[in-house]
Amino acid sequence: QVQLVESGGGLVQPGGSLRLSCKASGSIFSINSMAWYRQAPGKQRELVALITSRGMTNYADSSKGRFTISRNNAKNTVYLQMSRLRPGDTAVYYCHVADGLGVSHWGQGTQVTVSS
C-alpha cells in the first residue's frame, strides 16, 4: 500500500507564499510523474503543476510564473512553492503520484486559503 502525506497548507494573505510538501511511502515500485492538483468548492479538480521523473515540468496557465514544482527522488517527495498567492488560489491541494506500473495514487489533500 502506498501513502502520500501532504503538509504545508494553511491561511495566507494575498501576495504571500506557501510551500507544500508531499512524501510518498509504502509499497511503491517506482515513481514516474508527481503532480499537484487543486479543487475549489463547486469546481472540478484541476492540474496545478507536474514534474516527470526526469525533471520536466508542466504548469497550468494560472500557475506559471508564480508556482514552482520540484522533487527529491531520494526522498520520494514533491514540493510546490507558491508565491504571489491570490484569493482565487484558495482550494484543497492534492498530491498525485503515478508509479512505474501506471497506477495513480492520491494524497488526502491540504487546504490552502488565501484571504485578508
Image: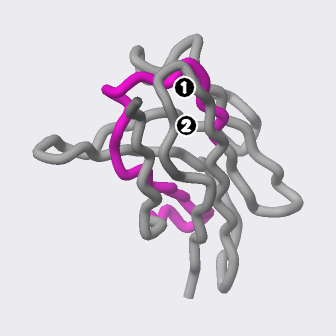
Q: Relative to residue 93, is residue 62 depicted above or below?
A: above
Q: Please state which of residues 10 and 73 is positioned toward the viewer in this rendering.
A: 10
Q: Relative to residue 19, is residue 2 depicted above or below?
A: below
Q: Please state which of residues 60 and 90 is positioned toward the viewer in this rendering.
A: 90
Quarter of the C terminus within the rendering: top left
- Mark nearer the N terminus (1 vs 2): 2
Compute the Cα span from label 1 to label 2. 5 Å
> At label 1, which amino acid type do we have?
Asn
Question: In the picture, residue 90 is in which quadrant?
Answer: top left
Q: Could you tell me which residue is drawn at 46 percent across and 58 percent down? A: 110
Quarter of the N terminus within the rendering: bottom right
Q: Please state which of residues 73 and 70 is positioned toward the viewer in this rendering.
A: 70
- 95 drawn magenta: yes
* Residues at discs 1 and 2 in contact (Cβ within 8 Å): yes
At label 1, counting other C-alpha atoms closer than 10 Å, the crowd grade (few under 14, some 14-19, many 20 or more) is some
- 74 drawn magenta: no
> At label 2, which amino acid type do we have?
Leu
Q: Is residue 103 visible?
A: yes
Q: Position of residue 89 (x, y in %)?
A: 38, 31
Q: Which residue is mark 1?
A: 58
At label 2, counting other C-alpha atoms closer than 10 Å, the crowd grade (few under 14, some 14-19, many 20 or more) is many
Question: In the picture, residue 46 is in which quadrant?
Answer: top left
Q: Which mark is residue 50?
A: 2
Q: Relative to residue 99, is residue 112 depicted above or below?
A: above
Q: Identify the magenta region.
A: 80-104
Report the label total: 2
Seen from this angle, which residue lies furthest front?
116
Q: Relative to residue 55, is residue 112 depicted above or below?
A: below
Label 2: state its secondary structure: strand
Q: Could you tell me which residue is drawn at 66 percent across and 42 percent down? A: 19
Q: Could you tell me which residue is drawn at 62 percent across and 38 percent down? A: 18
Q: Which mark is residue 116?
A: none
